[in-house]
Structure formats: C-alpha cells, structure tokens
Amino acid sequence: MYFAYPAAIFIIAKIFGKEARKENIMPPITMIIPMHNEEKSAKAKIENILALDYPKNSLEIIFALDNCTDKTKEILASHNDSRVLIFENTERAGKVAAMNKAVSLAKGEIIVFSDANSMNQSDTLKKIARNFADEGVGCVSGRLRYVDANSTAIGQGENLYWRYETFIKKQESRLGRLLITNGSIQAVRKELYPYPDQEIADDFSIPLLIQAKGHKVLYEPEAVVTEKATEDLTEEFKQKMRIVAQGIKGALRMRKILLKLSPLGIFELLFHKILRWAGPFFMIAIFVSNLILIKEALYFYLFLAQLVFYSLSLIGFLLRKKNRIKLFYIPFYFNLINFASLAACCHFIRSGQTHIWEKAESTRAIQ
C-alpha cells in the first residue's frame, strides 16, 4: 500500500487526470481561525493575517474562540481593524463546532480555514482563490511546510513523510479527488460548506462530504503555510495517534455517505487510508508468520531483513535528537507512525475518541 497506491494513482492520473483551470480572481473571502488558549501565538497570527496581500474590502477575518481561559481574546482585541470579528463559545464545544458557528456568521463567498500556529505566505489567499475560477471546484487545500525540520530525526521524518504525501496529493488533485485536506489551510465555497459532525475531524469530513456531492477537491501546492516541526517524541506520537483515531471514527460515522463516493473515491479511501490504518496489523502478521516458517530459507532471510529494519529503527530512536542519517531516521519514523496507528486502533476499540479539541504546539491533520 505504501508503494502500490502511489504508483497506481500516478498511472490513473496520467491517463484520466488534467490540470484544473485557474484564473487570477479575488472573490470575497472570510478567513476563519479557530482557537483555544492560544495566547502564545495569537499576536503573531493576527499580524500575519492582517499583512496578507489581498484586497482589504474583500477580506473578512473571524477568530472563533472555543472557551479560552487565557489572554487570547485580549491579545486579538488589541488589534483594532474593521475586518476582524471575534466571537467565543463560553463552553468547550470543540474545533469543528467553533468552525460551524463562524461559517454561519461569515459573509465571504469563499471560506478559508487556518490554524493558530500556522503562518501564511503573503500570497496564500490569491493562490487559493484562483482555483475557484472553475465552478466545479468545491474545496481547495494548500500546502503545509515545516520550518526547522532538519534539526532532529522526528523533524526529518516528518518532512520526508510530507514529501511523500505531497506526491500523492498532486495525483489525486489532477483527478479532482483530493482525499484529505490540511486543516492548516483549506478553503470551501460557503454555499457548499457541509456543516460537518463536530465529532469528526474537519480535514477528513469536509473534503469527503463535498466529493460525495459531486464537486472537485483540489490541492494547491503554491498556497503555502508554515509551522514549526515538533521536536518532542511524545507529542508527535500523541498527534499521530489522535489523527488515526479520529479518521477511524469519521469513517465509521460517515459510512453511509462514503458509499456515495465515486468508485475512484472509494478506491482512494480504501488504499490511501483504511489499509494504511491496518498497516501495523499486517506487519505483526508478517513477522509472526515468518517466525513460524523460519526453517525455510526464504522466510529465514525475510525474517532476518525485518530484524535489520527494526534494529535500524531502534538506532534511529536512540539517536533521534541528533540523527541526520536517512538509514536510521526513515525506519524510525515509519515505525513511529505505525506504532501510533496500532495504539490508536486499540484505544478506539476500547473507548472511542472524544471530539474535544486539544491544543498542541504543532497541530496536524494528516493523515
């Protein structure tokens, strides 16, 4: 699945895909930033947005606060700008609930969602907006790029993972069927906004709901936002685990809607996500079966290859704070992702997944 799916989707896109029509249009945009206790990033975020290169009379900015108990609201309110609207849920309801409320207040034709800790390049909105010249386009996702990603094995692995994912996103986009967007930078036509279930991750539910209605979902790699790569292994593991658990829950809760996807959409969901979530179980099964059949030469060498791979991963773990050798950090990050998937599956089976939004130093949606 890690190699067969990228190859298959590349071939399909090569045969049936085409580049989306783009024009330099600048429709009215409402930018929505959900926040929960973001006093550390609030000042930089609002200054970043107010400096964007987009016509002032075509840009509305809504900060959707989810029961902030710190100084986030005061920091935002200190920036006096007529384009800015701040509202707050007085009780914790979660990120998607805050987004849904903000969209109901928005005046723009295009809704652009952004995370509190992601910084936009000056032309991000222009790059996003040009894709909506095609009336068949319902949703567009931009590109998340990590800064300071080369300082640790975790950061290096994250960057490599996103390069891999970017290749897949480009192929899916050529087909108008980008499977998963990025919550740090995603845009939707307001008239098509599906007001998703607040217990399902927005970057999973929104593109799939829009696809199910027959509209295109695209990837715009030139619409760039940046985030600082995490340096903490525990934080990275919890984020990966949370993303997988949310995806599993979303797929189960949306199963009737997902059956309305095109055959291509179902193919993407199965091979890009569902089988990847099951990856650690396949790895365990292969390891155990090789161990049982170890007396046969072929399986002995396959078992030996697995031991070497996991040994390299262990070395990558031990050297994670200073490792810059791909031989170590690739196996380490690959196994980190799969171990997180295994933990997420087990956790979800036991207790399900809460919808309440947990703030993190670096929040990803992926995938």
Image: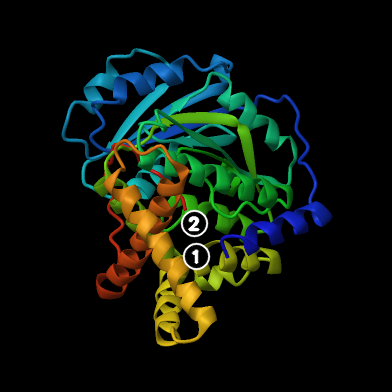
Dot 2: few (<14), some (14–19), or many (≥20) neighbours within 10 Å?
many
Front residue (pair 293, 11): 293
Residue type at mark 1 is: Arg
Residue 248 on image: x %, y %: 42, 66
Residue at the spot 43% in from the left edge and 44% down from the top edge:
157
Residue at the spot 36% in from the left edge and 39% down from the top edge:
323
**Comparing marks 2 and 1, which lies closer to the viewer?**
1
Q: Quadrant of residue 354?
A: bottom left
Residue 50 on image: x %, y %: 44, 16
Q: Quadrant of residue 263?
A: bottom right
Front residue (pair 42, 198): 42
Q: Element type at marker 1?
A: helix
Query: Residues at badges 2 and 1 in contact (C-beta under 8 Å)?
Result: no
Q: Which residue is mark 2?
A: 205
Q: Is residue 294 visible?
A: yes
Q: Element type at marker 2?
A: helix
Structural distance between the alpha carbons of marks 2 and 1: 18 Å
Q: Which mark is residue 276?
A: 1
**Image quadrant occupied by the N terminus:** bottom right
Q: Is residue 146 left or right of residue 358?
A: right
N-term mark: 2 or 1? 2
Number of numbered tags placed on the structure image = 2
Residue type at mark 2 is: Ser
Residue 213 on image: x %, y %: 64, 59
